[in-house]
């Protein structure tokens, strides 16, 4: 988290979702000082409203994304649990992060961050941000549409004429025919896509902070839902690596600040501190990078799935890690305002989100069980099922 400074209304900012490259940018702690050309002294009420709103918005994708990740991991066929997130499309399948992926992630994130830094130094910022705006427009529309889909399925009445469609591209012919794109959708999905496109055009034309936040929340929720850590050890490796990454790039160089100043994309949640004075046209933003939401969020979602696997009808580890996140984020804000300096939020979030559940597991005598918990990627699970079926046929 960082101290908020006045930001032009045309620059609400960025970080990823459900896509790894976007998350790499997100992890760059999108909470840096963005503009110091004009000082604005926020009122205590405005500051409290801004940071309270940021904390509330950060909790939404973690809580609901974690719940949806449980349903997503259980959904093997379309319609399981009366929830439209069956694996009829590859985009609906969770992406499993292994220990090897986790170890490489900080390196990839550092290369991405430094690459963006060089791009902004060499090329025109205006043209780069134009390309980024178009890119994130497409991603944002799809992410927001995917986020809205389960809600729309419940809102529309049963009498709604819901037709099924399929977008299919193949390559070759006969036995050598290969599917390139095979995407199934229905009328409800088209309605979601239309609404999301309206928000996308609003963001593209105005760069309004509300449109930025709608896309940012969608990215974060999709990231927490669809990025699955395969075990707790992998989560510790990922969070530990990004802990070092965040501290180094915030305190050790000016690279992150430069990128944050230049980068115009919805990879941050922002909220104006002058909302009470200027209304929706306010321009002095407090902000939180999506990486500070998604990275702890996927670890909290893993602990919720571990709770479910215990079959004890309790959510002890999920709630302890969720409360730890609130504590860590609150501590970030407190330290930031005490020392009047931007802070890498993961510096406080990682120890809290890892430490609290470990202490709970020690107290309950389930530490070994927690670290032994393992999730199998859907594709591997399907391969195992196919091999077992073929073995039965051979017998």
Image (cartoon, rainbow, N blue to C red):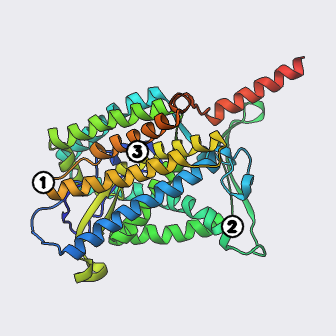
Q: Which mark is residue 296?
A: none
- Marks 2 and 1: in contact by CB < 8 Å? no
Crowd class of label 2 (few under 14; some 14 to 19; many from 20; radius 10 Å)? some
Would you place residue 200 above or below residue 91 in this image?
below
Residue 122 image offset from top left, x and y in percent: 18, 44
Residue under label 1: 339
Residue 43 image offset from top left, x and y in percent: 18, 75
Separation of marks 3 and 1 at Cα, in angstroms: 25 Å
**Residue 375 is drawn in which quadrant?**
top right
Instruction: Return the residue nearer the eye: 101 or 8.
Output: 101
Q: Residue at x 17, y 45 (%)?
A: 121
Residue under label 2: 187
309 to the left or right of 246:
right
Residue under label 3: 295
- Marks 2 and 3: in contact by CB < 8 Å? no
**Residue 166 visible in this rendered orientation of the protein:** yes
219 to the left or right of 208:
right
Q: Residue at x 21, y 46 (%)?
A: 256
**Residue 305 is drawn in which quadrant?**
top right
Q: Check disc 1 and report its element: helix, strand or loop.
A: helix
Q: Check disc 3 and report its element: helix, strand or loop.
A: helix
Q: Residue at x 34, y 41 (%)?
A: 350
Q: Nearer the viewer, mark 1 or mark 2?
A: 1
């Amino acid at each position: 988290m960082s101290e908020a400074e006045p930001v032009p209304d045309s620059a609400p900012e960025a970080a990823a979702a459900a896509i790894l490259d976007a998350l790499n940018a997100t992890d760059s702690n999108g909470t840096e000082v963005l503009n110091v050309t004009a000082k604005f002294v926020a009122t205590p009420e405005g500051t409290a409203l801004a940071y309270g709103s940021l904390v509330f918005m950060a909790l939404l994708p973690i809580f609901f994304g974690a719940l949806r990740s449980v349903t997503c991991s259980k959904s093997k066929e379309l319609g399981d649990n009366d929830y439209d997130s069956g694996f009829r499309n590859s985009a609906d399948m969770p992406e499993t992060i292994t220990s090897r992926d986790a170890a490489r992630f900080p390196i990839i994130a550092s290369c991405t961050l430094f690459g963006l830094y060089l791009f902004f130094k060499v090329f025109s910022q205006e043209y780069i941000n134009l390309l980024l705006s178009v890119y994130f427009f497409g991603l944002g529309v799809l992410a927001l549409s995917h986020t809205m889909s389960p809600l729309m399925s419940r809102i529309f009445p049963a009498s709604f004429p819901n037709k099924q469609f399929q977008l299919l591209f193949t390559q070759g012919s006969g036995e050598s025919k290969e599917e390139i794109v095979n995407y199934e959708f229905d009328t409800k999905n088209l309605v979601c896509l239309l609404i999301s496109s309206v928000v996308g055009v609003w963001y593209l034309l105005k760069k309004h902070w509300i449109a930025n936040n709608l896309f940012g929340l969608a990215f974060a929720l999709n990231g927490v839902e669809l990025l699955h850590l395969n075990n707790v050890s992998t989560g510790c490796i990922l969070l530990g690596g990004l802990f070092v990454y965040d501290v180094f790039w915030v305190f050790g160089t000016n690279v992150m600040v430069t990128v944050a100043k230049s980068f115009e994309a919805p990879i941050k949640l922002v909220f104006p501190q002058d909302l009470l004075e200027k209304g929706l046209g306010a321009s002095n933003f407090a902000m939180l990078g999506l990486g500070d939401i998604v990275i702890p969020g996927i670890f909290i979602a893993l602990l919720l799935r571990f709770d479910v696997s215990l079959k004890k009808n309790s959510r002890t580890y999920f709630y302890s890690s969720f409360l730890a996140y609130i504590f860590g984020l609150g501590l970030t804000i407190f330290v930031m305002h005490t020392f009047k300096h931007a802070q890498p939020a993961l510096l406080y979030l990682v120890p809290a989100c890892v430490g609290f559940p470990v202490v709970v597991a020690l107290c309950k005598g389930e530490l070994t069980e927690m670290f032994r918990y393992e999730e199998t990627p859907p594709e591997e699970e399907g391969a195992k099922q196919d091999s077992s079926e073929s073995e039965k046929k051979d017998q």
